[in-house]
Image (cartoon, helix red, strand yellow):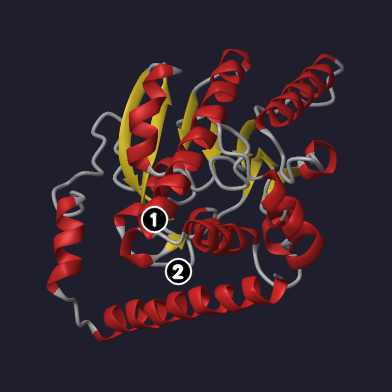
Amino acid sequence: MLKNIISAYKKVLGRMLRFTKKSIRLPVRLKYKLKYVEIYAKAGMFDGLYVFPSLGVYYQTQFINSKQWDFLIILDACRYDFFEKHVWSFMDGKLLRVLSPGGYTIKWFERTWYGNYKDVVYISSVPFIRRNRKFRTKFLEIVDAWDKGWDRRLHTVPPWKMNNIVLRYLKFLNIKRRLGLHTKKTRMVIHYVQPHSPYIAGPINFSRIYDFYMKNLRKVVVLDHAVLVHLMDVLNDLRKVNYVLRRAYEENLKLVLSYVSKLVPHLPGKVAITSDHGELLGEYGLYFHPIDAMVPELRCVPLFIVK
């Protein structure tokens, strides 16, 4: 069983790597094919889509590096199209489609947070942000939600635990202000894992796959690929695989939006919601975010100004 999974994983990974080399080579040599131009055009990437006149925002990076937010909520791997479909069931506000500078979290972080942010507390459920020394020195503080928010059964930091961590930190700041120990205005970034996998919501139960992965494959493959290979092995139909992944992703997004909507009333100030990058769910034969490519499913993300 284990050998079959590893063999299937290598085949899938090989296809991803071949695509990655091809997609990287084209921009470097400036050999843009018509199909890529068509993809960008359909996504509106040539028609001034990213203009937000009232705030002067053209790209996500400009807004994040402005002083026009007090609380910035990051939904990891959140696509614009899925967000647009579901956000109105939970919150009201102004929605804009913006361009993310990176196709995966590390690249996004490096290209977005290029200055010093000594007035910003970054509460992160993504572990490698705090592990990076360069990142740690940029902010007033990085709070690692993994320390107290990790759920062993779900193999992630669920959004309800993230909410509790944020609320506790806000109470801590208020106490320091009352004692005169903290006088400067502090902004906050709240980085949720979801809708990124593990998928913990909806009728599809992935817990057995996650448990098997943690016991047998943790040092061999990444979790996303283990799920993908398992689905391909069981369903043996790409259309069914894509449907299951999209459904699971969508349910994860609805789950985190429900908890974000519960947190927002407790945040005193201007609240904005965005994402570090999007997610591939079968487009171009690729899954998740294996490459730093300029494709709309990875780079088109929401910017939502909460009313």
Residue identified by numbered label 2: 291
Which residue sits at x=56%, y=19%?
264
202 above or below 39? above
Q: Quadrant of the N terminus?
A: bottom right
The three-letter amino acid code for the residue at tag 1 is Leu
Q: Are marks 2 and 1 in contact (CB under 8 Å)?
A: yes
Decide: few, some or many residues near mark 2? Use Cα within 10 Å; few <14, some 14-19, many ≥20.
many
Q: Where does the image place residue 258, in percent across and percent down from the top left?
A: 54, 22
Q: Residues within 10 Å of mark 1 (few under 14, many from 20)?
A: many
Rendered location of residue 186, percent (x, y): 66, 30
Q: Residue at x 34, y 30 (%)?
A: 85
- Image spot of residue 191 (x, y percent): 61, 40
Specify whether 123 is left or right of 294.
right
143 or 299, nearer to the observer: 299
Res. 154 image quadrant: top right
Can residue 146 be seen in the rendering of this structure?
yes
The spot of residue 124 in percent (x, y) is 68, 43
Residue nearest the viewer, comparing 275 with 157: 157
- Whether 31 is drawn above or below 102: the answer is below
Three-letter code for the amino acid on which mark 2 is drawn: Ile
* Residue that carries the numbered disc 1 in the rendered image: 298
What SS does tag 2 mark? loop
Of pointers 2 and 1, the one earlier in the residue sequence: 2
